[in-house]
Image: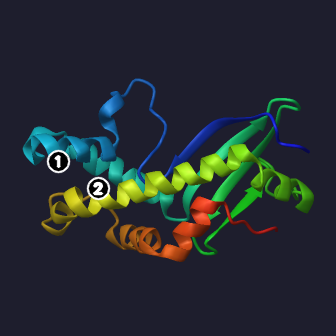
Amino acid sequence: MAFQNLDLKFATCFGWRPSIKGAPERGQWCDLAREAKTKGWRHVDVHGLDRDLATNVDASYFYLARGKFVDLDTQFAWRAVFVNDHGLWRMDIPGSPEAETLPEDAKAFFESEFFKKFSKRCGDLVDDAKRLFREVVEPHVKDGDLLSVAEEKLERILFLAENAHTMDNLRQGKYELV
């Protein structure tokens, strides 16, 4: 497969998720943290930030980033996840956990320009989320203002986000063949 005509159908990473239908656009915790930085903590939806951060931490605990891609030529779907335990990207077929991807397909996918742009963008989003968390949100977690977040999961994610090797692998699309 050439992977020249990919489309991203779904993506999430620490600090970013797709908009939820019917929810306000500015409901993501990073957006609320940016607002708090400019307007002040008392002028943002702290409950919404707490809830969204907790959801994002749970979603990012095993995979800092993930995306579902569709080859527009074949309509075949692929899923790429950054496996936190390995510090590398892995590819599989969504809905078919037993199906094996061919090593040559995985190599072609991970070396495609579309995926390279995606992995770099994920790295930028995780870096931004880490910075915003440290600058704006962390003092409020320590003070007990945000109680929904699983702090041990959050610490692991932040450890990974501050690890240069892990972030280089995320951003550069380093992968493992299964």
Residue 81: x and y, percent? 65, 57
Residue 156: x and y, percent? 43, 73
Instruction: Give the residue type that dot 2 points to.
Output: Leu
The residue under the point 89% across, 62% down is 103
The residue under the point 72% across, 49% down is 79
Could one spot residue 84 in this view of the protein? Answer: yes
Instruction: Give the residue type that dot 1 points to.
Output: Lys
Residue 5: x and y, percent? 80, 34
Residues 11 and 62: in front is 11
Above/below status of 48 relative to 171: above
Image label count: 2
Q: Would residue 14 be found to the left or right of residue 84 on screen?
A: left
Residue at mark 1 to residue at mark 2: CA–CA distance: 9 Å
Residue bearing the label numbered 1: 37
Q: Quadrant of the N terminus?
A: top right
Residue bearing the label numbered 2: 132
Reading the chain from its start, which is encountered first: label 1 or label 2?
1
The residue under the point 56% across, 55% down is 65
Residue 116: x and y, percent? 67, 51
Task: Please tell me in which quadrant of the rendered image residue 173 appears.
Answer: bottom right
Please give the label number shown on residue 128.
none
Asked whether the residues under the numbered discs 1 and 2 touch, taking CB atoms below 8 Å apart as contact, a structural biologist would say: yes
Q: Would residue 173 be found to the left or right of residue 41 on screen?
A: right
Q: Secondary structure at mark 1?
A: helix
Q: Residues within 10 Å of mark 2 (few under 14, many from 20)?
A: many
